[in-house]
Each structure stands twice: as C-alpha cells, then as structure tokens.
Amino acid sequence: MRLTAGKKRQDARRRVEAMNREFGAQTTKCRVFLVDDHPIIRHGLTQLINPEPDLMVCGESEDGSKALTAIREAKPDVVVVDLTLKRSSGFSLIKDLNSLKPKVPVLVLSIHEESLYAERCLRAGAKGYLMKEEAMEQVLLAIRRALAGQVYLSEAMQSKVFRTSGKRGENVVASPLERLSDRELEIFRLLGQGVGTRQIAKLLNLSISTVESHRARIKVKLDVKSATELLQHAVKWVETESPG
C-alpha cells in the first residue's frame, strides 16, 4: 500500500513537471503581479517564480485598493491574489480586475478552503483557485495554465464542480455556509476575525445599515437567534478554517 501510494505521488509529480515544461517552453518572460497581505508569502513566491525561464514578478501589493493602481502601472500578464487583504477584500479585487482588466487572468492563492470558495472566485472572474498548502510545482502550473487561458482547479475541486453541474435543476441540499451569498460569507468571515460592523463597512465600502442587513440575513440562513450566537459561530468557523 505504501509503495503504491508513493508511486502515485511520484507519477503525479512527474506529470506536473512535464506540464510545467510544456507550458514554460517560451523565451519571453510573462509578468506576474502578487497581491497578498503577508510579506513572507510574497517573498517566497518571488523566490519561486523569478528563477523560471518564462516567468518574472513585476510588482506586489498587500492592499487591494492600492493594487489596482500598481497593476495599471506594472502591466502584468497574470495577477495572483489572496482573499484576505489589508484594508480591502480579495473578492472585490477580483471583480474590479475582471471589469477593468478583463484580458488579464486572475489566479487565487489562499489558505481558505477551496470547497467553499473556489466556485465563488470563478464566478467573480478568477481563472483558477489553489490553496497555499499545494506543492510549489502546482503553483507554477496554475500560473502557466491561467496564462494559457485555461482554468486551474485541484482534481478534487474539478470533481465537485462536475458533480454540481450535473445536478443543476435538481433539488441539491447545500450546507448552511454554502447558502450564504459571496458578500454574506465575506462579512461572516470578518466577524469571525473580530472585525466590528463599522470597520467591516469601511473595508467593504458599504454603509453600516447595509452590513447590518447582511448580518440579519446571515442569522436567518444559519438559524441563529442572537448577535452573540452569530459571533460565536463565526469565531469557531474561522478557528476551524485557519491552519495550525
């Protein structure tokens, strides 16, 4: 069993390396822009990308709102975005980029569970989603697939999307969190991170009353009775979702 599992991992790694070579068989370097609120992650990605013969990091930002200006100046071929950013929302940045720079593919690289976020990001305009726990070769492959006009998802997520699309029109029972809209899920996550209503409104460029309306709908969808119970649910979910 161990030998079989080890051989499968080796075979998978060889396939990824072969695809990386295939996608990377060009002389000009494609420009990659990084948007992540952790400088260590940006540094690690730069160290991973720059030695590649066909890729180079042309700029970086920790803030989604500042990233838009920087991206206009840097003129990247692809943008790699995290969902959690300083003073802004990754979802909002994806939508803004899809509107302002529709020909520039966006790839999401995040700690957040792909089963809950990947389809939402694709609907927002992203061309792929992978988690930060993926192997380095997968990150390079995802970037190259996005540059080639293809969509990148993990094999498990591809299977889920296929099953979901095959059940359209049927009464598919979604989990409570899956029933939340993109905006409601953002607000729920921020609540779990200890962000107050006023600050959420500022981060997401919403009025306080709009945030409160979203909170009320979240309570109904999650079947919680009070603001305290909602906050407890949100904190517990964020703690469960975060690695380590």
Image: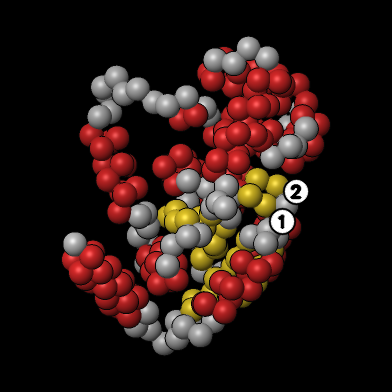
Q: Residue at x 69, y 33 (%)?
A: 191
Q: Quadrant of residue 214?
A: top right
Q: Position of residue 43 (x, y in %)?
A: 63, 73
The quadrant of the picture occupied by the N terminus is bottom left
CB within 8 Å, label 2 to label 1: yes
Q: Position of residue 173 (x, y in %)?
A: 35, 22
Q: Residue furthest front?
A: 2
Where 204 falls versus 138 (above or below)? above
Amino acid type at image mark 2 = Arg
In-image side of 24 versus 36 (left or right)? left
Observer-nearest of 193 and 69: 193
Amino acid type at image mark 1 = Asp
Observer-nearest of 103 and 162: 162
| Secondary structure beneath label 1 | loop
Q: Residue at x 54, y 43 (%)?
A: 241
| Secondary structure beneath label 2 | loop
Q: Residue at x 38, y 83 (%)?
A: 26
Please name the residue that numbered disc 2 is placed on. 87
In-image side of 220 versus 175 (left or right)? right
Where 54 falls versus 208 (above or below)? below
Q: How is the image coloured?
A: secondary structure
Where 41 falls versus 177 (above or below)? below
Q: Earlier in the sequence, mark 2 or mark 1?
A: 1
Report if residue 76 is visible in the image.
yes
- Check disc 1: other Cα within 10 Å, few if <14, some if 14-19, many if 20+: some
In-image side of 76 versus 20 (left or right)? right
Image label count: 2
- Which disc is residue 63 wearing? 1
Q: Quadrant of residue 209?
A: top right
